[in-house]
Amino acid sequence: MNKQGPIVVIEDDVDDQDILQEIFKRLAFKNEILFFTDGKKAFEYLNQPDSKPFIILSDVNLPKMDGFELRNKMFTDQEFQARCIPYLFFTTGTHKKAVMDAYALSVQGFFIKPSNLTALENTLRKIIDYWQECISPCYYD
């Protein structure tokens, strides 16, 4: 896990991107924030050998390749697994099957985006702070 790497946000809603961008500015994390509007573009970036993101926050419903397809590609690829990139779903709503399917793919978290800006900011702060403190197998490389 590259704690100085970019935070990858895969979100197709431009309004949500703007809100998230503003919250990340207020939180003043040093990580670059990279936005992708679909899973396919995100996968192209993530598949580059020099791509070393800190964390992935992915919506579930995405064009071209949804969050589950993207996570499955990463989960079944040994090279991706060795990079220890936390993959979290961050979506507006869900149901039990989606959460069960996500954890079957070993996601590291499933979050419903709070509709309140203060709650959204608090949630993002907790997520990033947690992963900044967390030690992964890559810690020993």
Image: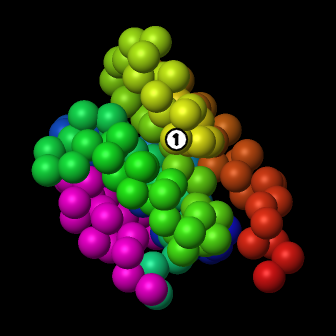
Residue extending farthest to the left is 64
Q: Is residue 113 visible?
A: no
Bin the neighbour count of mark 1 within 10 Å (Cα to Cα): few under 14, some 14-19, many 20 and up.
some
Q: Is residue 58 above or below residue 7?
A: above
**Colour setting:** rainbow
Q: Is residue 20 above or below residue 40?
A: above
- Write down the region rendered in magenta: 30-49
Residue 32 lies, in percent from the top left, at 46, 69
Which residue position holds label 1?
105
Q: Amino acid at mark 1?
A: Leu
Residue 103 lies, in percent from the top left, at 56, 32
Q: Is residue 36 visible?
A: yes
Q: Give the position of the N terminus as an image quadrant.
A: bottom right
Judge whether residue 32 is colored magenta: yes
Residue extending farthest to the top is 96
SS assignment at label 1: loop
Q: Give the position of the C terminus as an image quadrant.
A: bottom right
Residue 29 lies, in percent from the top left, at 58, 60
Front residue (pair 40, 8):
40
Residue 10 falls left or right of residue 77: left
Residue 100 lies, in percent from the top left, at 51, 22
Residue 111 falls left or right of residue 9: right
Residue shown at the point (73%, 46%) measured from the top left: 130
Front residue (pair 64, 17):
64
Front residue (pair 54, 115):
54
Residue shown at the point (70%, 52%) measured from the top left: 131
Judge whether residue 8 is colored magenta: no
Residue 79 falls left or right of residue 74: right
Residue extending farthest to the bottom is 50
